Each structure stands twice: as C-alpha cells, then as structure tokens.
Amino acid sequence: MPAITATAPGKAILVGEHAVVYNRPAIAVPVSQVQVKASVFADIHGQPGEVWVEAPEIRLTAHLNELPPTHAIVRLFALLANELGIPRYPALRLRVTSTIPIAAGLGSGAAVSVAILRALSAFVGHPLPNERISALVFEQEKLFHGTPSGIDNTVVTYAQPIFFIKGQPFSLLAVGAPFTLVISDTGIRSPTAAAVSGVRERWQRDSATYERLFDQAAEIAQQARRCIENGENRALGPLLDANHRLLQQIGVSHPQLDRLVDTARQAGAWGAKLSGGGLGGNMIALVNPAGADAVAAALSAAGAVRTWITQVKAGLGKDH
C-alpha cells in the first residue's frame, strides 16, 4: 500500500483575536509558507494495532501505546477511531514534520491535527470531508486550549481566508484585491491556553470594561471585512493598528511585540499588530508588496527570530 500524505498550512489572525472567544467576529488567513506534513505508511512487518510515530521536530520516536493517553497524537487516533468505528488500526507508521514554530500563534497545533486526520482517514479508506475534519480538530483544541473559539481549526482545514463568529456558520471571504503580509516571530513561546485563561480571569473581574473592548474589536472586524471585500488594502492598515491598541488594553501584548509593531510601521508598513494569543508569539504587518523585503529586514534587525512574507490572494468566498 502506498504512503498517504496530507499537508495543512499555518494561520494568522488578521483581526479579532480574543474577542472571538466572546462571540465577536474575527478574520483569519492561511499562511502557506509554513506547513505540517503527515505521512502514513503501511508496516508490513508489524502486527495489527501496532502504530509507530515519528515527529522529529519534537524529538518523538515511539510506539503509540508507549505514549500517555493525554498525548495529542494518541487522542487524535482515538477521536478518529471513534468517528469511523475502527476497533483496531492496521499496522502503520506515522511521520509528522513541520515548519510551523510551536506556541507562536501560527496554528501549529491545529495544523498538526488536520494533517494527521486527513492522512490517517485516507489511509484507512474513509477520507473525511472538511466539515468533519474541522469538527474533530475543534474537539482536540478544546482539550489543549481550554475555551477555543474554533477559528484555528476552521481556517487551517479550509485553507482560505475566513470571517468567523463562534457558534455561527462561517464565511469564506471574497478578497477584492490581493494583499501582502509580513509575519514576524518574536521567538517567545506563548501557549494559547495561558493567554486565553488570563483574559477570562480579567473579564470575570471587570466584564463591563472587557465587553466594551470586545465590542470595539467587533466593529474593527466588520470594517476590515468591508475593506478586504472592496480591495481597499491601504484602509485596512489603520484597522490593524487600532486592533493592536485594543489588544494592549486587553492585556495580551508584550514589549517585544510592541517593539516589532513599531518597527514595522517605521519601516513603511500600512498597519501592524500582534496576531494570535499574544504574550509573545508573532505579529503581522500589512505592507506594500514592493516594500515587503525592507519591512522584513527591519523586523529581523529589531530582534525577530523569523519572518515570512505571504500574499492573501484575491478570490470569491462563500458561506458555510
């Protein structure tokens, strides 16, 4: 049996992170410059039920039954077995490789889950549609992120820009004109669960203030959607700036994030903000394509450990 391979992209939140957990809209885009690849091979020498797992980026080489039940990969196998009614997997080897930095706000966890579930379900002869892949990954995200919104699993599964409100059908965005982002990694690891739980604690102590901030983030997301659909890229920049100021007030920025955001603006970016959970992780800058390299170089000089330039392509979206 030939190997089955599947990939999944990273993601960046354009606007609306954290507010999206509280039922406000957010916009996310796929980042194809980084990705996870999962390959499943038949193990002709193994016994039924024997699963060998390799994930070099996290130095993992083990039999599945040697891992704790709470391990992310163990849970994915269990979720899929339950979904498909599989009593026992055939003997197989799973190899997972990734160029997405961990705990950097680029959707590493969701991408790993999407790629594994795609490859594994195809290997056992029951490839799952996007809707079920996304739903299973959401279950996985709940275990590791506490109260996720569902935006990561959705944008990574569909690999298209989305307008998302928790608990509602999402929309694939109609992008009126392509726009270019420079993504910069601070190198400071920041697990999403910690950032989300911190916001929840502060919201519980002062819900009125945080609800106002979330409402302002919601209006920014609605304006950003109109800019994107109308191809008004320059007008999108100040909305990113405004969203970053809100995220500072929400309490999820970091001195290095602020430094990189300021650096990007000084280097000519139309707008910039942290992206994802915050407290580290990455930031994004909306740029004139001709100036993307200059902005990336300025960010590297200011201490960014990695930068990527990605283009969100024009195209028609639809509701789901």
Image: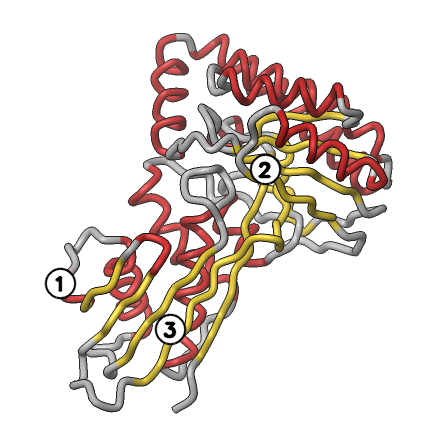
Disc number lying in front (3 or 1): 1
Marked residue nearer the N-terminal end (1 or 2): 2
Q: Which residue is mark 2?
A: 13
The crowd level at tag 2 (other Cα within 10 Å; few <14, some 14-19, many 20+) is many
Q: State if disc 1 and disc 3 touch (CB < 8 Å).
A: no
Above or below, 61 against 119 in this view is above
* Residue 101 percent location from the top left of the image: 46, 45
Does 230 sit above or below residue 212? below
Left or right: 115, with 93 as reference point: right
Marks 3 and 1, how far apart at CA: 19 Å
Quarter containing the N terminus:
bottom left
**How much space separates mark 1 and mark 2, taking CA atoms?**
36 Å
Q: Report the residue at 50% width, 62% height from top.
A: 131
Residue 316 drawn above or below residue 150:
below
Going from N to C along the chain, the mark reached first, 3 or 2, is: 2
Query: Of the residues tagged 1 and 2, which is closer to the observer?
Result: 1
Tell which of 257 and 48 is nearer to you.
257
The three-letter code of the residue at mark 3 reads Leu
Q: How is the image coloured?
A: secondary structure
- The residue pinned by badge 1 equals 66
